[in-house]
Image (cartoon, helix red, strand yellow):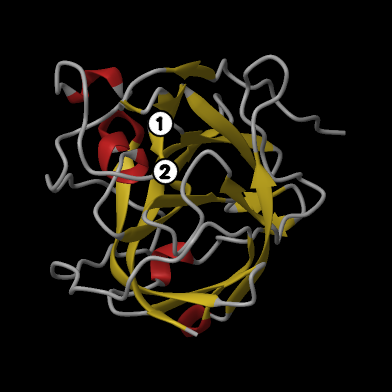
């Protein structure tokens, strides 16, 4: 029986700044290991930021593994048969919401609806993952903004498991302009509009754009993509959905 592969070390690092002595960003240097058909799949995690748009320190993105300058377009190969979509700059959206735990993420255009599990860090400083026993469950990184809150909210999930397709198996099929709904514990639904969906080789993963701070309320959804290396039992890249808050219900 296949067993879960080891997690690479995911350690907290101070990267993005401090306000009133409180750490704004928790960088989880390294990767998250997911799974697909009895193999491991890599989800880079770095620079998770709850809010703000300024960066402290040297201003270099080098502190974030695989980072590129925000706004830079990085081409890459996606999952077989998938074509990444792109959209224009996000329009001004509604006022950001207060922090509230997200419960369900839905992308109606591809028939996706998934419960959300809060993900934190274990006692060794390693990032948690959605359990393989719940392949249709996605995970929200609690050290990121909550969806609808000012800042960057980050959701991760498996593309497949030993039993078949998982929650984000068709994430690459989502098009720019599609709606993403996140139901929250406070009874409100944060409505996002997709700006783009892009596939990145692992070495070109734009950590600053995915995990860094942002203006307004932003959402990132990350899963595995690219080709599958049977010898290493992992995917070669990632698929990332970028979206901005466009409404509240």
In the rendered structure, the answer to whether residue 225 lies left or right of residue 169 reads left
In the rendered structure, the answer to whether residue 105 lies left or right of residue 51 reads right
- x, y percentage for residue 36? 64, 44
- Kind of element beneath mark 1: strand
Q: Which residue is mark 1?
A: 25
| Quarter containing the N terminus | top right
In whole angstroms, how far apart are the C-alphas of marks 1 and 2? 6 Å
Q: Residue at x 76, y 45 (%)?
A: 132
- The relative height of residue 72 versus residue 177 in the rendered view (above or below) is above
- The relative height of residue 94 versus residue 36 in the rendered view (above or below) is below
CB of mark 1 within 8 Å of CB of mark 2? Answer: yes
- The relative height of residue 43 versus residue 134 in the rendered view (above or below) is above
- Res. 87 image quadrant: bottom left
Let me know if residue 205 appears in the view: no
Q: Residue at x 45, y 52 (%)?
A: 153
In the rendered structure, the answer to whether residue 132 lies left or right of residue 225 reads right
Q: Residue at x 67, y 67 (%)?
A: 185
Mark drawn on residue 50: 2
- x, y percentage for residue 21? 40, 22
- The relative height of residue 61 versus residue 87 in the rendered view (above or below) is above
Q: Going by the picture, which residue comes out furthest to the right?
A: 1
- Res. 90 image quadrant: bottom left
- 110 or 83, nearer to the observer: 110
- 115 or 169, nearer to the observer: 115
- Res. 124 image quadrant: top right
Residues packed near mark 1 inside 10 Å, few (<14), some (14 to 19) or many (20 plus): many
């Amino acid at each position: 029986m296949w067993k879960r592969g080891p997690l690479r070390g995911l350690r907290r690092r101070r990267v993005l700044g401090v306000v009133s002595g409180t750490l704004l960003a928790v960088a989880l240097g390294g990767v998250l290991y997911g799974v697909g058909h009895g193999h491991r799949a890599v989800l880079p995690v770095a620079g998770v930021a709850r809010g703000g748009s300024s960066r402290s320190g040297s201003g270099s993105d080098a502190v974030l593994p695989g980072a590129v300058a925000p706004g830079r377009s990085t081409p890459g190969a996606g999952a077989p048969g998938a074509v990444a979509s792109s959209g224009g700059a996000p329009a001004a959206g509604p006022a950001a919401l207060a922090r509230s735990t997200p419960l369900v993420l839905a992308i109606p255009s591809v028939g996706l609806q998934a419960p959300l599990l809060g993900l934190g860090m274990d006692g060794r400083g390693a990032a948690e993952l959605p359990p393989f026993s719940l392949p249709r469950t996605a995970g929200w990184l609690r050290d990121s903004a909550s969806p609808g809150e000012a800042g960057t909210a980050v959701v991760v999930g498996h593309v497949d498991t030993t039993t078949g397709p998982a929650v984000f198996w068709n994430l690459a099929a989502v098009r720019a302009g599609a709606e993403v709904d996140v139901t929250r514990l406070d009874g409100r639904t944060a409505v996002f509009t997709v700006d783009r969906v892009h596939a990145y080789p692992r070495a070109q993963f734009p950590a600053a754009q995915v995990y860094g701070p942002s203006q307004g309320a932003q959402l990132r959804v990350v899963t595995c993509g690219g080709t599958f290396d049977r010898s290493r039992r992992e995917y070669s890249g990632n698929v990332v959905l970028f979206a901005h808050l466009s409404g509240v219900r």
